[in-house]
Image (spheres, rainbow, N blue to C red):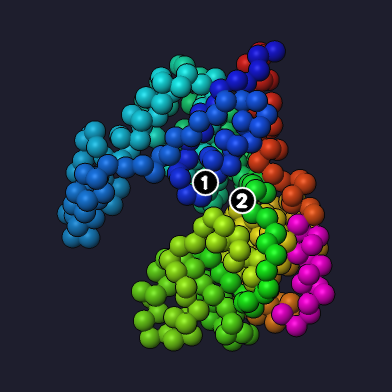
Amino acid sequence: MTKLKRALLVYSSRPPIADYLKAAFNAMGVEAECLYADENTLFDRYVIHHVNKTAHNLRLLPKDRSFFSEHPKAHLNYRSLKLVEAVNAFAPDLVLLIRGIRFKEEALIEVKKKASLFGWWVEREERQSEAFKEIDLFDKYFFMNSSCVDEARKRGIKNAALLFHSVDTKAFHPVDCKKRFDWCFVGGRSDMRQRFIEEALKVSSNGVIYGPKWLKKNIFNAPVRRAFKGAYIHGESLTRLYGETKVVLNITNWGEEAAKRTGMNMRVLEVPACRACLLTDGSRDLASVVEPGKHVAVYEGVQEFRTKLAHLLKHDDERERVASEGYAHVTVAYTYDHVARIVSEAYDVLAGR
């Protein structure tokens, strides 16, 4: 059987999923390199984007169209060219595209001539039509949402499989520090998230917020402005924040009816890996990864969110039990070593046919 030796990992630079996977592949003896698909040209950023946005706002151009669709420095064309160039230069056995960021079809066809092509869809299930448009171009296509795999099977698609998020335990780990905050939230502002954060502030004003657009949308909202600490936090600063917080909040912004959606974001694993207590909204897939009430605390709706947050802040023993049991579970069962092994084994099977 042919064994995987070289892998090219393609995603944006943040969150650094490609970097986590590179370390995992290297640890198992696979040479891996990263291509960051969010790298862009100054011409696209300051000219193309500005002109198109103005034209869209003035309704001179439909929002799905661009005046520069064929320009080589337009981001889609630029990153597609960079993908082909990286494959030619590195000569990988496998190219893993972590999806959500689109590439031109002709670039994917060119890549598949020279390497096995895998995809991993890590976006919300509402966008699954984008994945199904391209899935036939891939040798294997993983989804983090069980509903997408179910839909693929209904369509008779044979190359789809389920692969949940994982956690890098070197990046997310327990920090020996005192608890400074009752709660924290990391993520961009939305109307739905605003409702939950205002409820959290009613429970305790000793909370912190990191993420874009919170200040812009809360000019006259003093409690939110006091809680806001920055538009972005990452790396060891983020890990320390989780360690300094009694209850870390996860508000996914995927809708409030957990019973209807699948998948989950990275925070479900990253916070427990820091031995911190996570209060999260649910999904149909959540219990497949962590046990609600044991590894994480779960709420449904604003009222239950407020009640459970208040309860966890009052009950230190329960909060610490959830943090400890979550840590013991995710650091054994859901590391990127597992993802690298699953991807590598899928490649070996396909290459051996």
Q: Is residue 271 magenta?
A: no
Q: Secondary structure at mark 1?
A: loop
The residue shown at (52%, 46%) is 16
Q: Secondary structure at mark 2?
A: loop
Q: Which residue is mark 1?
A: 16
Q: Nearer the viewer, residue 99 or 7?
A: 7
Q: Quadrant of the N terminus?
A: top right
Main SS, magenta region, reads helix
**Which segment is the magenta one?**
313-327
The residue shown at (62%, 21%) is 4
Q: Nearer the viewer, residue 99 or 156?
A: 99
Tell me the tag on residue 175.
none
Say above or below: 322 vs 43. below
Q: As drawn, is 1 to the left or to the right of 208?
A: right
Q: Write down the quadrant of residue 255 in the picture.
A: bottom right
Q: Which residue is mark 2?
A: 171
The residue shown at (65%, 48%) is 170
